[in-house]
Amino acid sequence: MSGIFNEKTMTQALEKYLPDGESLTAGIHGVGIETHIRQVFGNCTLKGDNLIPNPSGAALEINKSKFARYDVYISITQHYLILAECEVYKHLYEFNESPELDGTDIEEIHTCIPISDIGTRFPLAQIQKCEIKKGWMGSVNCVITMKNGSSLKLMLPKRGGLGGGMPHHAEYREAIFARLSAISS
């Protein structure tokens, strides 16, 4: 467990989800309290645990949820909020082959995507609401609601673990907090 409180390990975990042209601005270890992620993909087929591009495929809605606390790296870039799980966790997946598309953005895929990679990056512009409240022992709780109906309940702890493996935790936490606070107002 203590190995997750390491900036190098965190950076490696987050970098695999970076969109082209983006770089990490700040990243910390946090706690996922509850997540419900909704994404709609077009022109694809679900094969096993992967989404495969398929020009004749229909729209597919994937809901990925977790209702238990888990360790997660939380990061921001210039335009994204990125989450990377610290360990492999189980999620509840639901698939809908006839989604209601009422203004929902449909993401076209061009390469194979493992469903475990769904819900790792969120455009900051798609955040509809961000409620920030003080938590226990100096932590900050964030409830983020996205325009597509996804929701994230995250806890940003005051400290970055024992052992000094995350020397920039306080600085990065404040940068993430400032960015999310600007969205919430």
Image (cartoon, rainbow, N blue to C red):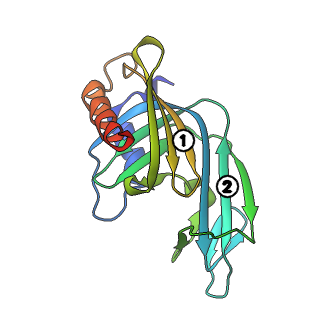
Q: In screen coordinates, is 13 left or right of 94? A: left
Q: Mark 1: which amino acid? A: Leu
Residue 62, quarter of picture: bottom right
Residue 89, quarter of picture: top right
Q: Eyeballing the image, is 22 above or below 5?
A: below
Q: Eyeballing the image, is 172 above or below 75?
A: above
Q: Nearer the viewer, residue 20 or 152?
A: 152
Q: How dense is the environment of label 1, judged by Cα within 10 Å: few (below 14), some, or many (20 and up)? A: some
Name the residue located 33 percent from the left edge and 33 percent from the top edge.
177
Q: Secondary structure at mark 2?
A: strand
Residue 46 seen anywhere in this rendered image of the structure: yes
Q: Secondary structure at mark 1?
A: strand
Name the residue located 51 percent from the left edge and 25 percent from the top edge.
1
Q: Which residue is denoted by mark 2 in the rendering?
A: 63
- Measured in 3D between alpha carbons, the distance from the residue under mark 2 to the one under mark 1, in whole angstroms, is 13 Å
Q: Residue furthest front?
A: 185
Q: In screen coordinates, is 127 left or right of 54? A: left
Q: Residue furthest bottom?
A: 56
